[in-house]
Image: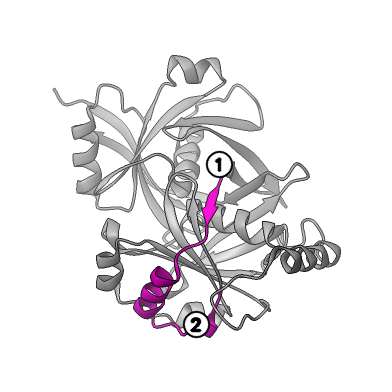
Amino acid sequence: MRTTRPFAQVDVFTAQPYLGNPLAVVLDGAGLSDTDMQAFARWTNLSETTFLLPPSSEGQALGADYRVRIFTPGGELPFAGHPTLGSCHAWLEAGCAPRAADTVVQECQAGLIRIQRQSFDGSARLAFGAPPLKRSNPSPKLLAQVAAALGLKPAHIIAAQHLDNGPQWLGLLLDSPHTVLQLQPDHAALKDLGQKVGVAGVESAPSAPNLIARGNREARAFGARSANTEPANSAVDSDHTTLEVRAFAAPLGINEDPVTGSLNASLAQWLIADGYAPSSYIAAQGTCMGREGRVYIHQDAAGQVWVGGHSVTCIRGSVTL
C-alpha cells in the first residue's frame, strides 16, 4: 500500500539554487523495499536519490543519528558525498536534532560518517569526514586506454591512482585546470572500458615527463614546501579555487556528474598526502555543465580530511510511495 511521505529536492555544493548537484531525498523510507527504492531512483533520473531511516541497532549503539540508503538510477551505493551532505541538510531542515550539537553521525552501508556543522562569516555549511581511502597504481595499459578516450597526451598526466572509498574511480592529475576544462571525452569508450574517471587540474602543478608519479622522496619534499608556504586555512574561507575537477561516469549511465563529493574526498586524500595540493583548498566542479559547484577541503591536525559545501533546498513537498 502506498503512503504519502515527506520529500525534498536539494541542490548540493552550492549556496545558489540550480548551480550545484541536485539530490532527491525521501525523508521517511520506512517500509520501502529495495525494489521500491530502486524504482523511484530510476524515475527521478537524478544521479542519486536517498531514503532516510532510523539507525540500525548497531548504528544507534555507536552514536548514529539516522541511516541513509543511496541509489543511482542503476543501483545502490555504499557511500557518496553529495547525498551525504544533501541528506543531512534535509534531515536538519525537517527539524531533526542530532545527539551532539555540532556533529551529525550518519549511518550508511560504508559505516558511520561524521558530519560537522560549520559556520564561516555568517555562512553555514556541512562537511563530512572522508572515509578511509584505498589506492593503488593503475596499469600502463589502462592509463593508455583512458588517455586515448579523454584525448590526452602522456605529457598531460602528472600522476594517476585507483581510488576507492566506497565508490571507485581512476583519478588523474593533469597539468593544468585549462587541460581539464578542454577535455571532450569519448564516453562510449569509457563505458566500454567500464571505467569511471575523475580528473583534476591544480594551479601551478609540478610537471612530469611521463605517466609515472613522482617518487616518495620528491613527494615528501614538495609536501614539506607546501606545508611551509600555505597557511592551514588559506583557501577554505576565500573565493579562490585551487583545483578544477571533472567526473566521468559513463558506466553508470552518467556521462558527467556536476559535483562529486566522494571523488573530491579521495582526490584530496591522495593529492594532499603526496604533496600535490595544500592541506586546505577549494575545488571547482561543474564548470563545463553551466554549474558552479564549490567543494571546501580541509585536513585537520589529526590528519582527517573534511569535505564541505553549502546546500539549498529547491523543492519541498511529499511523494506517494
- Horizontal arrangement in the rendering, residue 279 relative to residue 251 (left or right): right
Magenta residues, as a range?
A: 131-158
Q: Secondary structure at mark 1?
A: loop
* Mark 2: amino acid: Pro
Residue 259 percent coordinates (x, y): 46, 59
Q: Secondary structure at mark 2?
A: helix
* Residue 228, above or below 116: below
* Residue that numbered label 1 is attached to: 131
Earlier residue among tags 2 and 1 = 1
- Horizontal arrangement in the rendering, residue 206 relative to residue 93 (left or right): right
CA distance separating discs 2 and 1 = 31 Å
Q: Which is more toward the observer, 298 or 208?
A: 208
In the image, what residue occupies the spot 25% across and 21% down?
31
Instruction: Give residue 146's quadrant in the image.
Output: bottom left
Residue 13 visible, this angle: yes
* Residue 148, above or below 199: below
Residue 15 visible, this angle: no
Residue 157 percent coordinates (x, y): 53, 77
- Horizontal arrangement in the rendering, residue 317 relative to residue 300 (left or right): left
Asked if residue 141 lies in the magenta stretch, the reply is: yes
Q: Which is more toward the observer, 130 or 259?
A: 130
Q: Quadrant of the N terminus?
A: top left
* Residue that numbered label 2 is attached to: 154
